[in-house]
Each structure stands twice: as C-alpha cells, then as structure tokens.
Amino acid sequence: MAKEKKITRKEDAILEAKRKAELMSMMSETTHKVGDVKHELLLSIKDLKLHFETVRGPVQAVDGVNFDLVTNKAVVVVGESGCGKSSLAKAILRLLPRNVAHYSGEVWLRDIETMGLSDEEYREDIRWVKISMVPQAAMNSLNPVLRVGDQVAEPMLVHYGMPKEEAMEQAAVMFRNVGVPVDFLTRYPFELSGGMRQRVAIAMALVTGPDLVILDEPTSALDVLTQANIFNLLKRIKANLETSFILITHDISTSSELADIVAVMYAGKIIEVSESHRFFSEPRHPYARALMASVPRLREREEPHFIEGKPPSLINPPTGCRFKDRCPNRFEKCEEEPPTVVFGDDWVACWLYEGQGE
C-alpha cells in the first residue's frame, strides 16, 4: 500500500513538473502577475541553528533564524560576506558538511516538518523535488565531463525514474524556457559562456517543478547586461508560475530587481524582515540603514558611507545585540538581547523600537 502511494506521488509530481514546464513555454514577457494572486504560507523557519566544529571552537553560522515565506513571493537575504547567508541555504536544504557541531530548529514546508524526515525521505520527497537550489558560482559547479543536457535531465531520472528519452525531452523544454538553444543539449560546460552556464544551472533547478528555489549569489561574476537578463528571466518565472524564491546576495542594488521581502542577516541572525518597497526607502535597523547608505547612487554627489569596524567572530559572538560595537545608536540596553518588534508584516530586532509596533 505504501509503495503504491509513493508511485502515485511520483506520478503526480511528474505531471506537475510537466505542467509548470508547459506554462513556462507559454509564459508572457510580463514581469508582473496579472489577475488574482493567492499567497499561502509555503515555508516557515523557526529557531534554525547550524554550528560548525573548527579547531578554534564551534562557528555559530546560523544562530536562531526565524522567518516565513508565502507562495509566489521572493525573499532576498542581504548582509556582509561571512554573516551566514550561504550557511542558511545549506541549513534549509540539509546540505550539511561533516564538521557539523549543532543542527536544530524547525523548517516547515507547507504542512511537512522537514527536520523530522529521515535522510532518505528528505532526498526522495523534498530536495530537488519541492525545494531546489542554484548554488554559489553555479556556472562553475556543472560537471565538466558531462554534457549539460544530461545534467539537466538527471533530476528527473533520479527522483522520478523517468525514461532517459522522456527526461531529455523535458530538459529540452527547460532549455527553451530559460533561453538556451536546444542544440546546446549535447555541449559540454566549457563550450558555453558564463551567462549560458548560469541559465543551464537555473534550468536544472526548475526542471522538477519545485515550489521553492534558493539562489545563492546567482549573478556573481557575470557582466551587468547578463545580470539584467538573468533577473528578467527570474521575474518572468515568478510572475507566470507559483514559484517562490530565496535570493541570497550581498549586492543590494541588484537584489531590488526580484525582492518582494528583504531579510537582513548579521552575525548569524536575521535582524530585520520588511516589505521591499518600504525597506529600500526606509530601513529600520541601524545595520540595515548602514547597508543602504553604503550603496553607490547615480546623480548623487555624496560619497557612499562605509560601516566602520569588522563583524564579530561567529566563534565567540558578543552577548546582546551583535551589531552594538559598530552601531552609532548604541546605548546601555544594547548589552541585552534585543526584542522583536512587529510592524504589520514587518519586524525588527532592535532596542530603538522598544514599546513601538503592535
């Protein structure tokens, strides 16, 4: 009976992947959703922690992260290099290295608590089926000795047991959808430009029709024109399909292209979550304001402001507010753990807003 249910789930997943691929083939050039949009809770992360063991002690890369994501939305996680953004992606996808010292919390995908699944269940039912990823330096992560078409088809072979010929047909559909010529199916990664390799990596992440795609620095090392093309592609996918994105980046200026929600990460913690339109005009947390002030702007004579000091060590992070040693608004209460102050759908963890909010 259980085996029959599993077969039925796979068949349903294959049909859903094909449906989304067909929708992508017909999707318009618009980057804005037309008509009624239903936003249902897709991902809920509660007190997620991921610490790594090192010779100097455990690194608290992800230390009590909380945030929610609804369907057909994109959340952008911003912060300085080394603040734990990529580790957060690995924690969500359970892509854990061998030196894990501590891993805990809750990751809910709709009504499934994924942390409670066995490794086998997670591989079969979640990773690359419901959640996929475009890794950092994705254009260099392709296997150099395999044809790119085989690599895009592989998730359909592994997860759905699809026949090779049918999987290659699905790969060809995805190539057309992301703007890669179909005759590139038989090419090797070194025969493609950086932009084309990035599109292949996106096709590989989308081929199974996942509900959520995590993009870790998807446009790093690409020229400005190619970056714009990649973001236009992602916006069209989000506008035409019910796909949500988590975009991890330190490039605030390009992140605004895709963001519906902005989550600010500092020293292993999320310290502010805001709707993008409000965040880019009026960030609340002092660190978020400093990040925005460091972004160069056209037609402004004022030089960008840089954040003084260095981020704290994640091996021995400070107590209280972790930004306090660099904060221009520091006062006595910053020695204590800051409260989470809620403003509608937004929230900020900062003593400056004590007594405000809802």
Image (tube, rainbow, N blue to C red):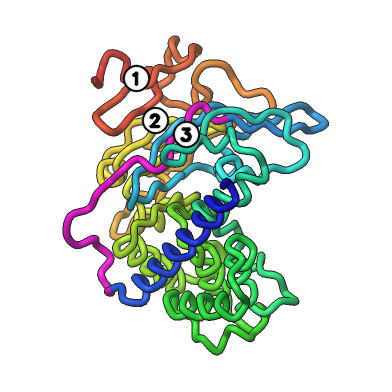
Residue 42 shown in magenta: yes
Q: Are marks 1 and 2 in contact (CB under 8 Å)?
A: yes
Q: Nearer the viewer, mark 1 or mark 3?
A: 3
Q: Amino acid at mark 1?
A: Leu
Magenta residues (range): 28-48
Q: Residue at x 51, y 52 (%)?
A: 131
Residue 73: x %, y % from top left = 34, 50
Numbered badge on residue 352: 1
Q: Amino acid at mark 2?
A: Pro
Q: Nearer the viewer, mark 3 or mark 2?
A: 3
Q: Are marks 3 and 2 in contact (CB under 8 Å)?
A: no
Residue 324 shown in magenta: no
According to the image, label 3 marks what residue? 45
Residue 207: x %, y % from top left = 50, 67
Q: Quadrant of residue 21?
A: bottom left
Residue density around tag 2, few if under 14, some if 14–19, many if 20 or more, within 10 Å: some
Q: Secondary structure at mark 2?
A: helix
Outermost residue, bottom side: 183
Residue 157 visible (yes or no) = yes
Q: Secondary structure at mark 1?
A: helix
* Spatial CA span between label 1 and label 2: 9 Å
Outermost residue, left side: 35
Q: Quadrant of residue 32?
A: bottom left
